[in-house]
């Protein structure tokens, strides 16, 4: 069967509802002859006569009546679906599926969700906290947050805020093992690794590369934080994790003259076309609360270890 019957359903509905080709043509913005040709093509495709035409009246045949009842319901469903799509683009509604990195998502994005739900009662949030890279289209994700270098993909990346990292250790560790004064001295230290780090198996400090060697490698940044606080070694942490401990002095920043590479926090969207209002609104919330050249978690962070305070 050709696609003609499906494409011409709105024309048939208009003819039946208005009672004439001319009135249907006026409703649809077509000419009466164009309406007549569409109905004829529809009848030829279905191999049956749908309408009885006389000079004074127009009505459905028995076969036409049977087809019209089903076709009219289908057309109503299509219109209802179009209306829902339009409303979804204009007013936040439906399920918002989010994919967020474990620590950053829990600390900085998840706290924004209750307020968002209160402001948009027709929205439901399905939140997945996971550090892996997800396929937004395959997994039906509306918005993901990712940090660092992004591989080439058709996904739309919206920069939210810069994300700096810091090399640090506890004062207890530095008291026992000394404070490195230049990157090469890290070879003598227990360097702890975050295994999901996308920069490879080396640390880039300014123009120098260091191959970290240590007795602990972990795929969770909060577990790495715990080890650093316990005095296990030296490691690099994003400032959104390290900031409170740098401010309190429980972690000491190291080698500030050799900064670690700057990364970015990105919001990922499946595509640029037809972004639902629920996604747009949540993206605006994230940008408004977390965006900016200096993220909230980096305020008042000491950048250098005071000389002579540890050996």
Image (cartoon, helix red, strand yellow):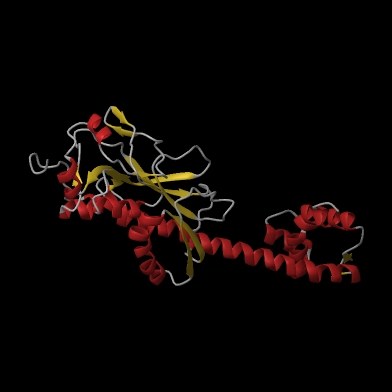
Residue 89 in the image: state x and y as whole percent: 51, 59
Looking at the image, the residue that sits furthest to the top is 207
Q: Quadrant of residue 66?
A: bottom right
Kindly identify the residue that appears in the image at 31 percent across and 36 percent down. Answer: 261
Asked whether 166 or 140 is in front, the reply is 166
Kindly identify the residue that appears in the image at 31 percent across and 39 percent down. Answer: 262
Left or right placement of residue 120 versus residue 40 in this view? left
**Residue 72 in the image: above or below residue 136:** below
Q: Quadrant of residue 110?
A: bottom left
Looking at the image, the residue that sits furthest to the left is 308
Kindly identify the residue that appears in the image at 80 percent across and 52 percent down. Answer: 3
- For residue 9, say whether it is visible: yes
Asked whether 45 or 194 is in front, the reply is 194
Left or right placement of residue 31 versus residue 178 in this view? right
Count of marks placed on residues: 0
Q: Quadrant of the C terminus?
A: top left
**Residue 192 in the image: above or below residue 83:** above
Residue 114 in the image: state x and y as whole percent: 38, 69
Residue 199 in the image: state x and y as whole percent: 39, 37
Kindly identify the residue that appears in the image at 47 percent across and 58 percent down. Answer: 98
Left or right placement of residue 122 versus residue 285 in this view? right
Left or right placement of residue 28 versus residue 168 in this view? right
């Amino acid at each position: 069967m050709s696609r003609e019957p499906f494409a011409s359903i709105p024309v048939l509905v208009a003819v039946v509802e208005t009672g004439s080709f001319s009135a249907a043509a006026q409703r649809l913005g077509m000419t009466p002859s164009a309406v007549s040709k569409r109905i004829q093509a529809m009848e030829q495709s279905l191999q049956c006569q749908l309408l009885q035409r006389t000079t004074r009246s127009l009505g459905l045949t028995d076969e036409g009546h049977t087809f019209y009842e089903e076709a009219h319901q289908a057309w109503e469903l299509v219109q209802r679906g179009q209306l829902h799509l339009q409303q979804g683009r204009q007013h936040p509604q439906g399920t918002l599926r989010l994919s967020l990195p474990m620590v950053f998502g829990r600390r900085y994005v998840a706290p924004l969700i209750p307020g968002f739900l209160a402001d948009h009662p027709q929205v439901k949030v399905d939140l997945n906290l996971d550090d892996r890279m997800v396929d937004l289209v395959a997994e039906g994700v509306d918005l993901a947050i990712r940090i660092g270098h992004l591989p080439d993909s058709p996904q739309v990346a919206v920069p939210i805020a810069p994300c700096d990292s810091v090399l640090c250790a506890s004062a207890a560790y530095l008291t026992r093992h000394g404070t490195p004064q230049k990157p090469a001295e890290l070879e003598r230290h227990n360097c702890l690794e975050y295994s999901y780090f996308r920069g490879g198996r080396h640390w880039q400090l300014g123009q120098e590369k260091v191959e970290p060697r240590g007795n602990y490698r972990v795929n969770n940044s909060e577990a790495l934080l715990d080890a650093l606080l316990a005095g296990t070694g030296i490691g690099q942490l994003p400032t959104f994790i390290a900031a409170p401990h740098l401010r309190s002095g429980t972690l000491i920043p190291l080698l500030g003259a050799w900064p670690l590479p700057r990364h970015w926090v990105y919001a990922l969207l499946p595509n640029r076309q037809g972004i639902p209002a629920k996604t747009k609104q949540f993206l605006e919330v994230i940008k408004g609360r977390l965006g900016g050249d200096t993220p909230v978690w980096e305020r008042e962070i000491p950048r250098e270890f005071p000389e002579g305070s540890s050996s």
